Image (cartoon, rainbow, N blue to C red):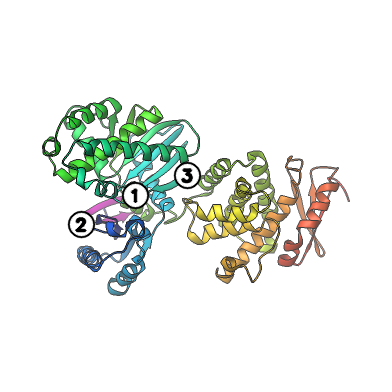
Amino acid sequence: MSGHPVLLIDCGSSAVRAYVAEVGPGQRSCILEDLVREVDLTGGLAGGRLDRAAMDAVAQAIEDIIAVGRGYGVELIHAVGTAALREAVNSDVLVERLRAEYGVAVDVIDSGEEARLYHGALRPLLAKQNERLRGSALLMDVGSGTSVIAMIKNGRLVHAVDEHFGTERVLSNFSSLRDSGDYANAVDRITAGAVQMILTRLPRTRISNLVMAGNEMRDLHRLLRESGGGSADLGNIGVIERAAVEAWWVDMLALNAPGRAAKCGASIHDAGLLMLCASLLRHVMARTGVESALVPQLRLRDGMLADCLPGAQGPHHLGRAQLIAAARELSRRYGMNLRYAENTASLAVQIFDQTKELHHLGERQRTLLEFAAWVHDVGAFINVRSRHKHSFYLINAADIAGLSQVEKAVVAHVARYHRRSAPKSSHNEFQRLPRTTRVVISHLAAILRVAYALDVERAQRIRKVRCNLVDDRVVLEADRREIALESWSVEDKSTLFRDVYGLDVVLKPRGDD
């Protein structure tokens, strides 16, 4: 295959892993090297610190991996950092060291981006087997430091979050119990509690499919398959039956630590990790009622590789359909009236589309406006009177797959300014943004305010508007005749539009000259 080589690096809590891959035309790729260098960054979890030895180990791993990549003529390097680098208080020191010494810019990603990468890696695996995840699917990647939890509805990624439940993180808490029967009981109890919390925080829906990823989960699948307890695999997607997990768990309970290690063909430490994964899986299955779980052969760097293929949008990017599905889910989670939210979003994009000669913004900004309109009122879940401020907080606090940090800031600020105060010099979060970003926010917030004013009763009386630029005014023609209340509301809430565009906004009834 003729193509160009790339180097994709995943700096995790227990290892630095990398692909040297060749990317060619026609969505084709080939993994040339799959590299793993063990490190220990677990000291950085939960706000801890990375010591010098840990940083040196990562630097050495990066140096070794780059040397291999250079041998293939690699020029493009993409590196990400996950839980340990997110949580360590001094991770910036390591990230800057890698940039200065090796020219590697590590993108420390949030759980939303992790979920997007896993979802991007899962889709081609399913397509290859002509499989679809119908209904709602729960995707869990069980890592060393954290687990990434994603909800997929009808193939679209709609929710993502990370949980401080990682194999090494949990196991370290019970090292003193590892040689006694208390270990299995303690692990099972803490896992049961973690699963309860994870599922409680998910969007309310019936889960039809389980997709379990992670090194130990793949090892567990292999053990069950070799013992005759697994189902037939679907190509690169394994299947674990609930009955097989339960039977294996019972067998392991009867053994001491050396016996468990012997049964797993692993060290006592690794056998403990496998038990933890089995406990997690059996509790998830019990609570969701799903009788079998898919265990795909996918890794974070498979998603990174998908980002390099021709036509891919690249990191931190999902298209409009995926993002609006996520916005709808966020709106639903915080109790917004979905019909009101949808109508406000529709009105906002109608105004956006018909005023392009004023703002000169593109399709991505249109999607950000639509997203903000869907979620602008989620803050009412906390407090109605200051709901715009609470919307800003909730959106900023959410891990939203498919938005960059700057794009999420745009959405949060547009929602923040949909009512009450316009941007001020005293608003520090707004003023810290680049000037171009602040201008985009002002353009979009001005439009959202007008859309918000058009449904002052939240009854969706006005569903269509036609915009015309007449002299020094933007004239909105509504699809209603009786609009006295809406006219007053538009006049009251269009001050920001006038400040941004230098034009008054006037609402006229249908067919009025």
Q: Position of residue 335 (x, y in %)?
A: 60, 41
Magenta-span inclusion, residue 201 = no
Residue ID for mark 2: 38
- Residue type for callout 3: His
At horizontal 34% and vertical 59% (from top left) the residue drawn is 81
Q: Nearer the viewer, residue 124 or 195?
A: 195
* Label located before the other in sequence (2 or 3): 2
Residue ID for mark 3: 159
Question: Of helix, strand and loop, which one carries label 3?
Answer: strand
**Magenta region, residue range:** 19-35
* Label located before the other in sequence (2 or 1): 2
- Residue type for callout 1: Thr
Tag of residue 469: none
Label 1 – label 3 distance at C-alpha: 16 Å
Front disc: 2 or 1: 1
Residue ID for mark 1: 146
